[in-house]
Amino acid sequence: MKSFLFFFLAPFVFLAGCSKGERTTVETSLHMGTFVSISLPGKSPDEASRFAVEADRIMEEMEGSLSVFRKNSDVSLLNRSAGGRVKVSDYTWRILNLALKYAEISDGCFDPTAGPLIRLWGFNGGTVPERIPDSESIKAVLKNVGYGRLILRDNGKELSAWLNRKDVSIDLGGIAKGYAVDVCFNKILDMGVSNLMVNAGGNIRCAGESARDRPWTVGVRDPFNKDVIVGKIILENGMAVATSGDYERFVEIEGKRYSHIMDPRTGYPAEGMAGVTVLGNTAVECDAMSTAFFVSGTNKVMEILEKLENCNVLFIPDRHPLEIWITPGFEKYFEPENGLKNRVFVLSSVCAD
């Protein structure tokens, strides 16, 4: 008889197969405002604790550098010092480079300088407005948004960054968890682990198998019903997956719900998608691009994917009846639930919006 280990950590349901007699130890801690879990098939709790300690150390160090909520982090210092150059850590330097890379690839749909917009709409320390921000307020904030305003420098002795306008600020919430997953994943593999899943709030990367001859399997949650999955993703060795959705963090203004995911091009919360899942080689890429594709929708998805390697996307538009749109390469890994097989559509170069 098959048994399963279930994790209800949004936005996925994890279905990691376990054979009778086999042990999978799961170490869970709280970092970056979410639960971080390390699943280790075949490891006892005593063995797993050694890897969990190292993961905690890495997560704490990165959070200390990258969090907008920590006054002394590199990111907070950079934001306070906008207009001037700031020395940054290696962790910060690398993630800022990656953030600029994915901002350029996505034509600005992902943008690390969207911090002022996020706060304008009441997130990350901002006050939820009683009314929808007017066009003039949005235009004023947009003057301080644009990834070209983030400049990095490596003079061979020191890594530094600066924001070229006083009111510019960065927010790495759309990429930091994925980056943290990759760093922990690679470190634990270097410590001799073969079978592993690292998850930070739904940003996942796996190695090996969940049990003998059984791959890691992830169930994608229905964005309209948190207790239901729309299908399963079969993950191969080293693969990563991340989802962006409008159902976890939102505000209500004048009776309408608005997502925390901003469209940096317009200044308004992104609309049109309920959930976007990205499958790829690294968790950082999946994290950033799930945000980017949530903003862009299916528009130009195939064109953008040409700039990436082994990256595929699943879209669930914000409309009824439920539809699931996938890029051609996603078919290999996705098993829709029986009642939804006729609701799955494969994208081509033609836009589905």
Image (cartoon, helix red, strand yellow):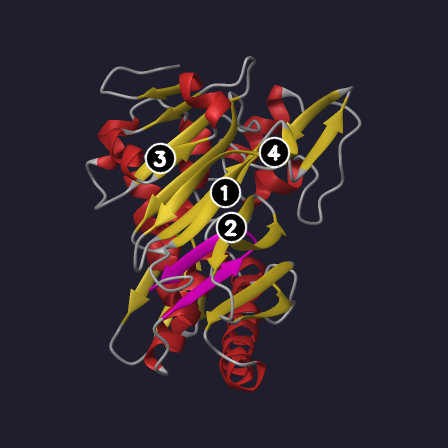
The residue closer to the viewer here, 115 or 57, is: 57
Q: What is the x, y in percent for residue 4? A: 54, 54
Q: Which mark is residue 228?
A: 4
Q: Which mark is residue 313?
A: 3
Q: Amino acid at mark 2?
A: Leu
Q: Earlier in the sequence, mark 3 or mark 2?
A: 2
Assess disc 1: are there few (<14), some (14-19) or many (≥20) residues with their C-alpha within 10 Å of its C-alpha. Answer: many
The residue closer to the viewer here, 350 or 291, is: 350
Q: Residue at x 50, y 22 (%)?
A: 339
- According to the image, label 2 marks what residue? 15
* Front of the two marks 1 and 3: 1
Answer whether labels 4 and 2 touch (C-beta < 8 Å): no
Q: Is residue 153 above or below residue 203?
A: below
Q: Earlier in the sequence, mark 1 or mark 3?
A: 1
Q: Amino acid at mark 4?
A: Val
Q: Earlier in the sequence, mark 4 or mark 2?
A: 2
Answer whether labels 2 and 1 touch (C-beta < 8 Å): yes
Q: Secondary structure at mark 1?
A: strand
Q: Residue at x 30, y 59 (%)?
A: 237
Q: Which mark is residue 219?
A: 1
Q: Residue at x 33, y 58 (%)?
A: 97
- Cα separation, mark 4 vs mark 2, equals 13 Å
Q: Is residue 291 above or below residue 320?
A: below
